[in-house]
Image (cartoon, rainbow, N blue to C red):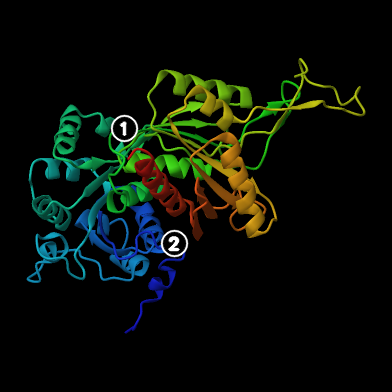
């Protein structure tokens, strides 16, 4: 009927990171299936083609018509003479329609146990078995009541699947239920498996993210609008590439995935102390300083709460805080340091020149310059546009794109410069 299904209009509206990739999303009979159309469409917004496969139990909870609307593709609810499982997941040359990844989301206890024991009696289990044979990546996202998830045989079956290389994501235990993983975490895992190179295996990376809080009294503080998203995306990308990552984070508005190792900090002094301790006692290859560290801090924090009934005019003395990248370089002369230089409403040339001056002054290896005054790429935006500058003042311009994409380009530049430095 349609030359182009209306649902395809959302393709790549949030980026192109999954362009050319096909995800086979397999739905089973959990009430969490109501989240699957949202997940499918988020994958499409990043450029993926999505094909849905449903068990009979899943079709009793939501209609296949909804998934066809969500994906713009016909939904597979039974296997026919067209051998859909071979078409989607079979071991054959890469062709249009063949899946790059199988996402079982949500996965019931029943389906998980069937997959673990090689039972193929639904379209979903047969496609997963076929994917095993063709070595396609498989992600299983459990969702059920908590008491079911605690079944010792189910626990044993999950362990068996993990040993076979299956990625099991979640669940979140809440309100007596083993709930489906968060949508953002599911999307991130798909990106990790489909896109990321494993070029950081064996490397240790320290990343800082988010704002600091400099307290005036015990409840009031000075801070900034940093969401922490850029640093978090760098940590996620580095982890996906195989690095051993530690994230040192302030009070971030963006969510930090549970799988990342992290240390929470509040003030500039806490950040500096933590970074110095890590660099002094652990052998890091990279330090990527993406946190928005306060340049000034009150000279004193007043005990208790300043009374607005008694104090009509408040004067605060501020002092310049140390530069965290300077402290890091003094503590460790070998670690490869990537810094950020944020400016507002400046020309491209001034942005680059100021960043390069900071690179030379602080004896760091790479600096990333961006204009946080622009609303479309600023602190709270999911997108960014940056200039990556090295010691020779070679400039890499990363045009506006998702912060995950920008993170990948920053790491590409860091790896290349690290390789040159160690030659």
Query: Is disc 1 placed on a helix, strand or loop?
Result: helix
Query: Is disc 2 placed on a helix, strand or loop?
Result: loop
The residue mark sitting in front, 2 or 1, is 2
- Which disc number belongs to residue 120? none
Counting the numbered discs, the total is 2
- Left or right for 165, reference 299: left
- Distance, label 2 to label 1, CA atoms, is 36 Å
Residue 412 in view here = yes
Give the answer, above or below, for where 95 lies relative to 307. below
Percent from the top left, x then y, of residue 7? 39, 71
Please tell me which residue is depicted at 51% across the width and 25% down the height of the picture: 275
Give the answer, above or below, for where 153 lies relative to 396. above
Percent from the top left, x then y, of residue 255? 49, 40
- Which disc number belongs to residue 146? 1
| N-term mark: 2 or 1 | 2
- Where residue 257 sits, quadrant-wise, is top left
Residue 371 in view here = no
Q: In which quadrant is the C terminus drawn?
A: top left
In this view, the residue in front, 225 or 76, is: 225
In this view, the residue in front, 374 or 36, is: 374
- Which disc number belongs to residue 15? 2
Crowding around mark 2 (Cα neighbors within 10 Å: few <14, some 14 to 19, many 20+) is: many
Percent from the top left, x then y, of residue 71? 33, 66
Please tell me which residue is depicted at 22% across the width and 60% down the height of the picture: 53
Please tell me which residue is depicted at 25% across the width and 67% down the height of the picture: 75
Q: In which quadrant is the N terminus drawn?
A: bottom left
> Circles 2 and 1: CB distance less than 8 Å?
no
């Amino acid at each position: 009927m349609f030359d182009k299904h209306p649902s395809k209009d959302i393709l790549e509206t949030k980026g192109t990171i999954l362009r050319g990739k096909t995800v086979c999303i397999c739905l089973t009979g959990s009430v969490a299936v109501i989240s699957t159309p949202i997940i499918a469409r988020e994958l499409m917004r990043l450029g993926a083609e999505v094909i849905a496969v449903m068990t009979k139990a899943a079709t009793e909870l939501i209609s296949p018509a909804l998934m066809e609307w969500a994906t713009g593709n016909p939904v597979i609810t039974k296997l026919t003479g067209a051998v859909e499982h071979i078409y989607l997941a079979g071991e054959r040359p890469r062709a249009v329609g063949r899946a790059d990844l199988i996402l079982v989301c949500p996965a019931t206890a029943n389906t998980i146990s069937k997959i673990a024991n090689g039972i193929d009696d639904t379209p979903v289990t047969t496609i997963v078995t076929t994917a095993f044979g063709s070595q396609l990546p498989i992600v299983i996202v459990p969702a059920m009541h908590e008491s079911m998830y605690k079944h010792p045989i189910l626990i044993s079956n999950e362990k068996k699947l993990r040993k076979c290389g299956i990625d099991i994501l979640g669940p979140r235990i809440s309100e007596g239920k083993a709930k489906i993983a968060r949508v953002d975490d599911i999307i991130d895992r798909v990106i990790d498996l489909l896109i990321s190179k494993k070029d950081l295996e064996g490397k240790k990376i320290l990343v800082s993210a988010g704002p600091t809080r400099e307290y005036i009294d015990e409840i009031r503080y000075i801070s900034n609008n940093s969401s922490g998203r850029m640093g978090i995306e760098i940590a996620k990308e580095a982890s996906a590439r195989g690095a051993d990552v530690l994230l040192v984070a302030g009070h971030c508005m963006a969510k930090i995935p549970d799988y990342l190792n992290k240390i929470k900090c509040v003030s500039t002094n806490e950040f500096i102390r933590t970074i110095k301790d890590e660099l002094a006692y652990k052998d890091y290859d990279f330090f990527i300083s993406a946190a928005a560290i306060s340049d000034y801090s009150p000279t004193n924090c007043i005990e208790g709460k300043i009374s607005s009934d008694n104090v009509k005019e408040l004067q605060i003395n501020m002092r310049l805080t140390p530069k965290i990248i300077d402290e890091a370089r003094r503590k460790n002369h070998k670690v490869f340091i990537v810094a950020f230089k944020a400016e507002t409403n400046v020309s491209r040339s001034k942005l680059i020149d100021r960043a390069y001056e900071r690179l030379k002054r602080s004896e760091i290896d790479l600096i990333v310059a961006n204009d946080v005054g622009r609303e479309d790429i600023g602190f709270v935006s999911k997108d960014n546009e940056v200039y990556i500058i090295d010691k020779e003042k070679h400039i890499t311009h990363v045009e506006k794109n998702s912060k995950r994409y920008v993170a990948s380009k920053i790491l590409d530049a860091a790896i290349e410069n690290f390789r040159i430095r160690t030659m």
